Image: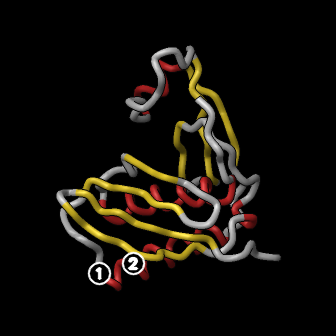
Amino acid sequence: MSKDYHPRMHSAEHILNQTMVRMFNKGRSFSAHIEKKKSKCDYHFHRNLSSEEIGEIEARVNTVISKNHFVTESFLPKDEAEKKFNLDRLPEDAGDKVRIISIGDYDDCPCIGTHVENTSEIGTFKIISTDYAEGVLRLRFKLLEESNS
């Protein structure tokens, strides 16, 4: 299985997912399409977001990005990872160790993708649009130019 990963966007997706968990306690996205120019995440939800909530999500994600967190990888035995993470999307033949990506102390998540080394490489996060239908909230987002700090 080969995917075309975009490290900046993929790292931003992790931060967005953790922000959604912290704000709404509805879980991480169940489906995502990550591309270089714009991306989308789908969440099991009960309504669309208000403009205030959209602004709050953007502010929180950009605050995390601005903290220059290191993005690191570690490996956990599968049985230990099952106690901490939802491994439903893990392939059956994934092996005995699970790769965990950590963004500072903000987010930990099993992942096979490529990421930035530091959140300072991501740039500014911007939600383009949201919509809601049949229990699914879709967020579309993009990244503005990388920060030069």
Alpha carbon distance from label 1 to label 2? 6 Å
**Residue ID at (62%, 55%):** 11
Query: Dot 2 surroundings within 10 Å: few (below 14), some, or many (20 or more)?
Result: some
Residue on which disc 1 sits: 50
Q: Which amino acid does the dot numbered 2 rest on?
A: Ile
C-beta proximity under 8 Å, tags 1 and 2: yes
Q: Locate residue 25, reporting x and y percent.
A: 30, 56
- Residue 113, by quadrant, is top right
Q: Locate residue 27, reporting x and y percent.
A: 34, 50
Describe residue 65's horizontal placement relative to residue 70 as left or right: left
Looking at the picture, does residue 10 appear above or below residue 2?
below
Q: Locate residue 56, reporting x and y percent.
A: 42, 79
**Residue ID at (57%, 26%):** 98
In this orientation, which residue lies closer to the viewer: 129 or 149?
129
Query: Dot 1 surroundings within 10 Å: few (below 14), some, or many (20 or more)?
Result: few
Looking at the picture, does residue 35 appear above or below residue 74?
below
**Residue ID at (74%, 58%):** 118
* Residue situated furthest bottom in the rendering: 52
Q: Which mark is residue 54?
A: 2
- Residue 149, by quadrant, is bottom right
Describe residue 69's horizontal placement relative to residue 23 as left or right: right
Question: Can you say which quadrant of the picture contains the N terminus?
Answer: top right
Q: How is the image coloured?
A: secondary structure
Q: Label 2's element?
A: helix
**Residue ID at (75%, 64%):** 121
Q: Which amino acid does the dot numbered 1 rest on?
A: Ser
